[in-house]
Image: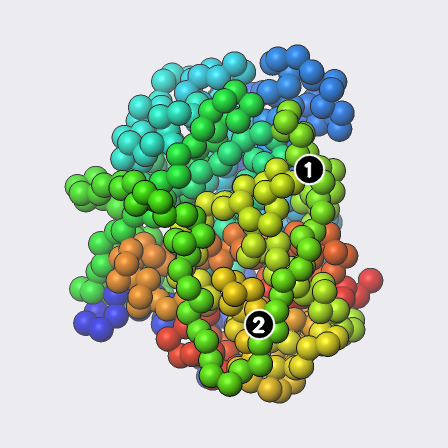
Amino acid sequence: MSNPQLSIAQHYHERTKYDPETIASKNKRLDWDNQPIPFKEYKLGTTIDLKPYLKEDPQAFAQEPGKSWWRLSRLLLCSYGLTAKMATMIGPPVYLRAAPSAGGLYPAEVYLISRGTSILAPGLYNYQCPSHSLVRFWDSEVWSGLQEACLQHPSLETTELAIITTAIFYRSAWRYEDRAYRRVFLDTGHLLGNIELAGALTGYRPSLIGGFVDQKVNDLLYLNPEQEGAIAVVPLADQLQGQSSPSQPTALPSATQFDYPELPDGELLAYLHQATQIEPTDKQEIESPPSGESESEKVGEDKYNFPFCTKISTTTSPIQWGSVTREGYAPQALENTILKRRSTRAYTGAPLSLDELKLLLDFTYQPQHYSEQGFEPYPDYLDLSLIETFVAISGVMGLDEGCYYYAPKAQELRQIRFKNFQRELHYLCLGQELGRDASVVLFHTADLKKAVAKYGDRAYRYLHLDAGHLGQRLNLAAIYLRLGVSGIGGFFDQQVNEVLGIPPDEAVLYITTLGRPRS
């Protein structure tokens, strides 16, 4: 039964909260006979092998088209390529990828659409992770259809190549049921974070389009919309070819639905996804940003300035990844970090230094500090002004234990609770020792009511995509600093706010734990 006070996105969030009294009923046995395969196969199509272009020395491909193939191969490898193979006690091995995924389920698929480049003929391509190859499954002009689906977004006028990420929902729902919708978008946010950085390393400038006509993009890719849906469109401006990517709004609203049926468990995810779509009949217009408005000004002021709280500056010198050359060749440190990233399984409980915490926050929230190294000073998010960050400190030398609000504009931590929360964090993270033994537990939150008022129910997508993107930057900074890091998508939602003192209007989207890894 619909709730006149809650839109379908808000209703979904409430329905999929984990609660101590009801969580046992949500832990159903996994159906191992129907375990999803995390790779999509095409029976027909032309295969393009990208493995020969994985040589570390780009000078081996100094001439076109070899250089373009080398760049595209590295871009896809660092975005979503396979990085390890792990044997399992039951079933097939698990193939790990450059981007993390809840439960190792990898719901995302990556497609390339070519307008016609020096190496890729016009058509549709699917990235085959197991073989690091492309399958060209449609070989005619499709760019105009993409432009129509994206409402003539300006970035598609000046580019020739675009990535489309989709999700096969059952891959995550097999384990996480209706709550999988959250994890699908967090996982895709991780992937978008990799695409952004991999683009900088290979001479591409990705733009992010979150507002598009879903049905048209799905039809363009020949998807079965009951199983797979488009999540994000990412035009790639080839900077080495002089292509530019104009900065334009990337998030568009959907309808807000208050009149919805009573939905049984197992049907809520599919219903929400349909409700968050932009329909072909919806009137949308992409507006240019007001002249003179900088990217930093779009983020707005820090939301919370608690009275009488202790304030700790987080300003620091940035991580030195090494400068990207004019040819678009990667600093080895960042590429190696992307490819060796792993989610930590256990922490020692030993403290971090305050300098380490400052570096983690700086790389995640202050990308403008890395422009001199060749990275985008203001990478594309959907709407960072809706995301807030709270940090539970259990072990950071030189910093009192407690819960802090991180103010990115002021670059400071503002303490709101004085307490060691290790015992409570163990409980809040569903008994996972990662919560108890982490030195730092970081929470991304958002005012869901405010977000829905701005973007309709589609806001639920945008919030989790941005939270996952931020989470991936945390992942990579931690791995570079030889720290442990692991994201947590399952937690007692309501109790997190109550225990840590996070304002009740802030819906918890994502948790990232950080600490010293146990070898």
Front position in the image: 375 or 381:
375
Coordinates of residue 348 in the picture (x, y in percent): 78, 71
Kindly report the distance in space between the C-alpha atoms of the residues bearing marks 2 and 1.
Answer: 29 Å
Report whether residue 36 is seen: no
- Secondary structure category for the residue under label 2: strand
Query: x, y (%) of residue 394?
Result: 67, 78
Q: Position of residue 503 (x, y in %)?
A: 42, 79
Mark 1 secondary-structure assignment: loop
Is 210 placed above or below 387 here? above
Q: Is residue 221 left or right of residue 467?
A: left
Q: Mark number for residue 227? A: none
Q: At which x and y percent is residue 106?
A: 55, 48
Q: Quadrant of residue 354?
A: bottom right
Q: Which residue is mark 2?
A: 413
Mark 1, residue position: 323
- Give the amino acid type for the residue marked by disc 1 in the picture: Ser
Q: Which residue is found at the position 53% from the left and 27% from the top?
A: 239
Q: Is residue 74 left or right of residue 155?
A: right
Left or right of 10? Residue 244 is right
Comparing 289 with 220, the one in front is 289
> What residue is rendered at 37% in x and 75% in y?
505
Q: Quadrant of residue 450?
A: bottom left
* Neighbour tally class for label 1: few under 14, some 14-19, many 20 plus, Cα within 10 Å: some
308 is higher (above) or lower (below) than 183:
below
